Image (spheres, rainbow, N blue to C red):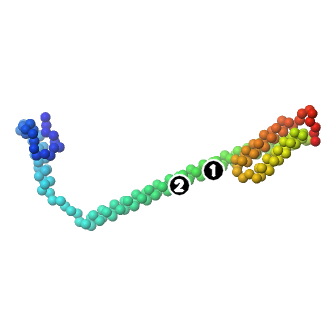
Amino acid sequence: MHIINNRLEDRLTSAEQEHLKFCEQCTFEQQAINQLKCSVEEMKLLHPPESDWLAIQQHLAKKKQVKRTSFMQFFISAAASVSFIAIGWLTWDNYQLQGQLEHVLYVNQTLELQLMQNGTPTFNQIQLLSKIRRIDFQLFDTTTSLQKISLLKQRQKLMAEMITNKKGKHYEYNI
């Protein structure tokens, strides 16, 4: 059994004192610890000059300011990132709406061309045309793309119905 090395007490137990008589390693370590304790007690405490303390305080104050600016930089960069993402999303959303609008307009144009090929409309087709004209007036009044797309889809359904009723039923008269 060896003596615990990190113990700084002066008193040793009788078993430890007996061990020191036979163990050179523990004797050497115990003497080194005793010498260290004596040299620590003899040391004078040195006090740095007041100018050094002021320099340290100024240095710490500068570090705090640097930390504040780094927080501001983080906040500004986060705001810029969020703005970039928002602008990108709005641009993509606008692009998709524009594509939908163009598609619906193209379908409506092809349906109108098919209707133009038939020379004389039936009574049912005239009623559908009046509904289509009402939707056209609503289209002029709306400002949002989503409303325009929904109105154009309604118009598209009415025009498709007109094409299916192009020939009319056997009991309908042409005007």
Quadrant in the rendering for residue 60: bottom left
Give the x, y percent position of residue 45: 18, 59
Q: Furthest-bottom residue in view?
A: 51
Regarding residue 20, the answer to whether it shows in the image is no
Residue at image mark 2: 80
Q: Quadrant of the N terminus?
A: top left
The residue under the point 70% across, 47% down is 146
Would you place residue 164 above or below residue 109 in this image? above
Give the x, y percent position of residue 8: 14, 46
In the picture provided, is 74 more to the left or to the right than 146? left
In the picture provided, is 54 more to the left or to the right than 113? left
Q: Amino acid at mark 2?
A: Ala
User: Foreground residue, 127 or 119?
Assistant: 127
The residue under the point 11% across, 50% down is 35
Give the x, y percent position of residue 37: 13, 50
Q: Amino acid at mark 1?
A: Thr
**How many numbered tags mark residues here?**
2
Q: Which mark is residue 72?
A: none
Q: Which mark is residue 91?
A: 1
Give the x, y percent position of residue 42: 12, 56
User: Foreground residue, 80 or 135?
Assistant: 135
The residue under the point 12% across, 43% down is 29
Q: Label 1: state its secondary structure.
A: helix
In the picture provided, is 124 more to the left or to the right than 70? right
Using the numbered discs, state the Cα–Cα distance from disc 2 to disc 1 in whole angstroms.
16 Å
